[in-house]
């Protein structure tokens, strides 16, 4: 039996490295730190979303035309792309295991493409309280600074992409919540292994600590800090989001996500808003956050202008 691809789809800072390490504790599942290899392959045919010095727009048009004129058309091109990627997975794993697990959070940009390219693939959607995701982004990559706008493509586009992907392909996927995996592991993990056609061995809940996935891309803290499942991260977000600027931003963010999308993710808008309001308000980093908020409004305008100029430069 040939090796099958297994994708863990989530926002960054959602606990995907924990899921990856626990699954990789089984001999049937091979993996490496975040590959990212499918992003440039899929974007090769997209006119938007990438900038190249040779011209993304003409290149994508030429590649699409090349594919359409080749034997099998675009379907044939994607078949060869699938073989290419599967061969890379096999090389990375030495051909070991029933599955190769590719955990690349920004695959949310190509969720729909993954389902089309890998009809025999397995897809695990991992959800986490979006407020905890925001806080983890701030603490991990911002070192406590309010840098959420830098991660807007993930926090906003990522939510939209993942929810729509699960709604469209829920019959081929499995959804799990990070909170359930860490607070009730004996109940939450077995369905995941059942979905993969593997018996659940409780030993993976502890033996995953032996799996090391440190690399340039990936979780820079969790894989070092946690060698056992811990509920500690479930409440940490409250300390990070306690000042008025952050609480206001988070209220608007939750309302943007909306009750419908949150329901798909397994959360309640009213409960999350209540949980946010219950946090004692503290002034920590308030001045810095106000300055960043002012700067962000100017910076966003500048970025949009620069993007339009690059787009014109890259097109014909």
Image: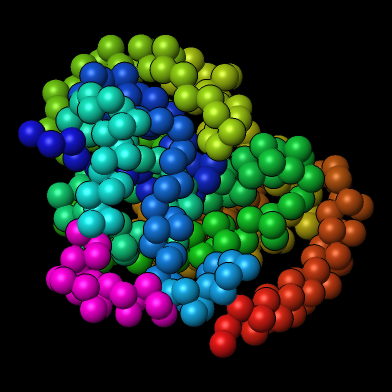
Give the quarter of the figure containing the N terminus.
top left
Specify the quadrant that holds the C terminus: bottom right
- Residue located at (40% from left, 30% from top): 32
Q: Position of residue 88 (x, y in %)?
A: 32, 40
Q: In the visual, does 261 lie left or right of 256?
A: left
Residue 291: horizontal and vertical position, in percent?
89, 59
What predominant SS class does the magenta segment belong to?
A: helix
Identify the residue at the far bottom of this view.
316
Q: Nearer the viewer, residue 213 or 292?
A: 213
Color scheme of the displayed model: rainbow
Instruction: Between residue 26 and residue 18, name the one nearer to us.
Output: 26
Residue shown at the point (22%, 34%) measured from the top left = 99
Residue 298: image quadrant is bottom right
Picture residue at 17% right of the left edge, 55% below the top = 119
Left or right placement of residue 175 versus residue 1 in this view: right
- Looking at the picture, tell me which residue is in the foreground, 3 or 108: 3
- Residue 280 vertical position relative to residue 96 in the rendered view, above or below: below
Question: Which segment did they paint magenta?
Answer: 61-79
Measured from the top left, where is residue 172 in percent x and y? 18, 53
Q: Position of residue 136 (x, y in %)?
A: 62, 40
In the rendered image of this protein, does residue 209 appear above or below residue 239? Answer: above
Magenta-colored stretch includes residue 64: yes
In magenta segment, residue 139: no
């Amino acid at each position: 039996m040939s090796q099958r691809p297994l994708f863990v789809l989530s926002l960054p800072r959602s606990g995907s490295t924990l899921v990856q390490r626990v699954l990789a504790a089984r001999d049937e599942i091979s993996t490496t730190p975040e590959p990212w290899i499918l992003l440039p392959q899929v974007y090769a045919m997209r006119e938007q979303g990438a900038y190249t010095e040779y011209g993304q727009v003409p290149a994508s048009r030429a590649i699409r035309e090349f594919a359409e004129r080749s034997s099998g058309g675009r379907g044939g091109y994607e078949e060869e792309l699938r073989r290419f990627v599967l061969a890379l997975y096999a090389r990375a794993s030495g051909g070991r295991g029933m599955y190769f697990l590719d955990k690349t959070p920004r695959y949310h940009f190509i969720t729909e493409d993954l389902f089309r390219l890998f009809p025999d693939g397995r897809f695990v959607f991992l959800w986490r309280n979006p407020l905890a995701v925001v806080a983890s982004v701030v603490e991990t990559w911002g070192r406590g600074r309010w840098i959420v706008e830098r991660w807007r493509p993930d926090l906003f586009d990522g939510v939209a992409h993942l929810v729509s992907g699960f709604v469209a392909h829920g019959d081929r996927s499995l959804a799990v919540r990070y909170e359930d995996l860490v607070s009730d592991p004996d109940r939450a993990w077995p369905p995941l292994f059942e979905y993969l056609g593997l018996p659940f061995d409780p030993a993976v809940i502890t033996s995953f600590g032996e799996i090391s996935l440190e690399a340039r891309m990936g979780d820079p803290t969790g894989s070092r800090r946690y060698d056992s499942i811990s509920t500690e991260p479930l409440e940490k977000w409250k300390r990070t989001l306690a000042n008025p600027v952050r609480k206001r931003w988070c209220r608007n963010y939750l309302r943007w996500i909306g009750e419908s999308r949150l329901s798909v993710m397994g959360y309640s808008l009213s409960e999350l808003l209540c949980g946010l309001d219950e946090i004692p308000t503290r002034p920590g980093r308030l001045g810095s956050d106000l300055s960043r908020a002012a700067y962000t409004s100017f910076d966003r305008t500048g970025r949009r202008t620069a993007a339009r100029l690059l787009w014109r430069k890259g097109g014909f």
